[in-house]
Image (cartoon, rainbow, N blue to C red):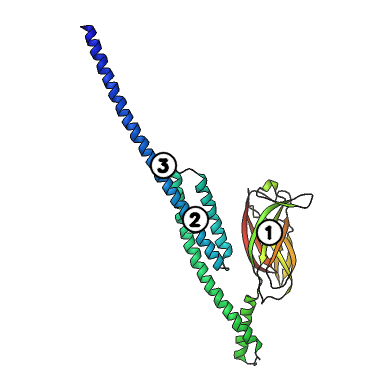
Amino acid sequence: MTTQNNNLTLKILIGVLGALLLILGIFTYKFYNEEKQNKAILQQEKDLIESELGELITKYDNAIALNEVMDDHLLKAKERIVVLLDSVKDNDANLALISRYRREVGKLKKERERLFKLADSLTVANTQLTTDLDSTSVALNQRIILSDSLQTQNSKLAEIVERGSALTAANIKAEGVRVRNSGKITTSSKASRSEKVRVCFTLSPNKLTEKGDKNLFVQVVNPENVLIGDKISVNFEGAALTYSGTNKVFYENEALDVCILVDAAQGELVKGNYIVNLFSGPRMISNTQFELR
């Protein structure tokens, strides 16, 4: 009788264990399918984010091709999108990363709207200025009748010509460099490996600017708010400018690529963000920032 009871108990236990194993198998299969579906959804969202970032880059490329006034701002915004796209491609899809990337895409879209509106308004203003300059050139070729009213008009026209003939610069870029014994210059993004700062830019073509020698000055301010380089002051009609480096070039109204090397004393090149200001005489014509790690 005892043996029969034990057999019955054993059968019951085997049945319970079988049922538990069946339930566990069902839950495991269901969990596997849900996990597979979640991964597919996250991958779809990742692909969508990559597509949106690609479209943003295309829109920036088109805007840069059509707008010369804000090329530098648009290029920097595009570079941030390219970096984010590379990050999306390099990382596996998960909920936390997808949420962060989605927030970043939203911010980039808002920034694009703001920059494009600003670019459009600047393009209109630049077109109007070009029209004003054309009419000014014609007016200045005419004989000037000395009168109080015409003198006032001539003063206004002279101000427009002065603004239109001012030297401008584009595509400014600054970076840490190291000069080898052979004279070869290599770039470096690390403060510990950099000896100098190289600032390169393009003087924009301008038929109204007077040909001849142009004195260009650059200021480089390190993350500790210290001006590095030559630290030489020059006076312009009572205004003093202290610069890090200078270069004298001959300008012929055509686009001209220029670079200025700024020497750095020991301890001046530290980690952080640097501010770079470019001057033509006393007038600042461009600026940028860069980072040394």
Disc 1 to disc 3, how far (Cα)?
47 Å
Q: Secondary structure at mark 3?
A: helix
Disc 3 to disc 2, how far (Cα)?
22 Å
How far across and down, in percent of the image, does residue 168 sit?
64, 69
Q: Nearer the viewer, residue 246 or 230?
A: 246
- Quarter of the figure that contains the N terminus: top left
Which residue is painted at 51% across and 64% down in the image? 115
Which residue is painted at 51% across and 58% down in the image? 57
Q: Secondary structure at mark 2?
A: helix
Which dot marks residue 39? 3
Whether pointer 1 and pointer 2 mark residues with C-beta atoms closer than 8 Å, the reply is: no
Is 255 situated left or right of 60 in this image?
Answer: right
Relative to 21, is 116 above or below? below
How far across and down, in percent of the image, does residue 293 sit?
63, 47
The amino acid type of the residue labelled 1 equals Val
Taking the view exactly as shown, the residue that stands out farthest to the left is: 1
The amino acid type of the residue labelled 3 equals Lys
Circle 2 sits on which residue? Answer: 54
Whether pointer 1 and pointer 3 mark residues with C-beta atoms closer than 8 Å, the reply is: no
Which residue is painted at 33% across and 35% down in the image? 30
Quadrant location of residue 219?
bottom right
| Mark nearer the N terminus (1 vs 3) | 3
Circle 1 sits on which residue? Answer: 199
The amino acid type of the residue labelled 2 equals Gly
